[in-house]
Image: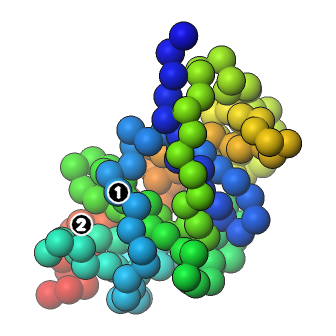
Amino acid sequence: MSTQKIIIFQVGQEDFGISAEHIRSIEKVPYLQEVSNLPKEIKGLMSLRGEVIPVCDTGTMLHGKPLEVNEKSKILLFELNDHMIGCLVSDAKDIINITLDEIKPFHMNTKASEYFFGVIERENKMILQVDPNKFLGKIDDVDHLPQLIKEEMA
C-alpha cells in the first residue's frame, strides 16, 4: 500500500497536515519586514540565504486574525510558480507516515473548507489535509508577488 509523509502543523489550537513533498524547509521565524502595499494575507518579508521571501499569515487566512509569533512559531517554505513563499504557523509538530486510504473525505461548507481535501484521525484528533495550491492560490495577487516585492523594495 502506498504511503505518504505528512507534516503536522498548528494554526492556533487546530492541527493541519500537508504532504511533505510540498514543503521545501521548515524555519524558525526570523525578523519579518512589514511592507504596506502587499496583499493583506502577507505578514511580511523574510530574508533567507540571500533571497527575499514573502510570508503569509495562516491565522489571517484561516481564522481572519493574525497569529502571535512566539518561540514555537515556524515558517513552512513552499515553492509556488517557481518562487518561494513562506507560511507562518503556530507550530510544526511532527512528521507522520500515512497510507492514502487513511485520508477520509472532508465535507463542510465554510469559506476555509475549500483549502482542504480530506481529514485524518490520529490519537483522537482530526487533522485537516491542506491543498497547498488552493490555499496559497487564494492570496490576493499571489502570481504577482515577486513583482510587487521588487516594486516595494526599489
Up the image or down, 128 lies above or below 48; here it is above
Instruction: Identify the residue at image location x=55%, y=32%.
Output: 97
Assign a secondary structure to mark 2. helix
The kind of residue tagged 2 is Pro
Along the line of sight, the residue nearer the viewer: 109 or 55: 55
Front residue (pair 5, 22): 5
**Above/below status of 74 relative to 79:** below
The extreme right residue here reads 124
Residue 108 in the figure: left or right of residue 87: right
Task: Tell me if 63 is positioned left or right of 140 in this view.
Answer: right
Q: Quadrant of the N terminus?
A: top right
Mark 2 in CB contact with mark 1 (< 8 angstroms): no
Query: Which label sits on residue 146?
Result: 2
Badge 1, how many Cα within 10 Å: few under 14, some, many 20+?
few
| SS at mark 1 in the image | strand
Decide if residue 90 is on the left or right side of residue 144. right
For the point 39% across and 49% down, the residue is 23
- Give how far apart the Cα atoms at labels 2 and 1 are: 20 Å
| Residue bearing mark 1 | 25
- Image position, residue 118 (x, y; %): 68, 32
Q: Please state the horizontal and vertical placement of residue 141, each as a whole percent of the image.
A: 39, 62
State whether residue 89 is above or below residue 101.
below
Q: Quadrant of the C terminus?
A: bottom left
Would you say residue 130 is visible in this rendering?
A: no
Who's the residue at 24% across and 66% down the image? 146
Q: Residues within 10 Å of mark 2 (few under 14, many from 20)?
A: some
**Left or right: residue 128 compared with residue 20:** right
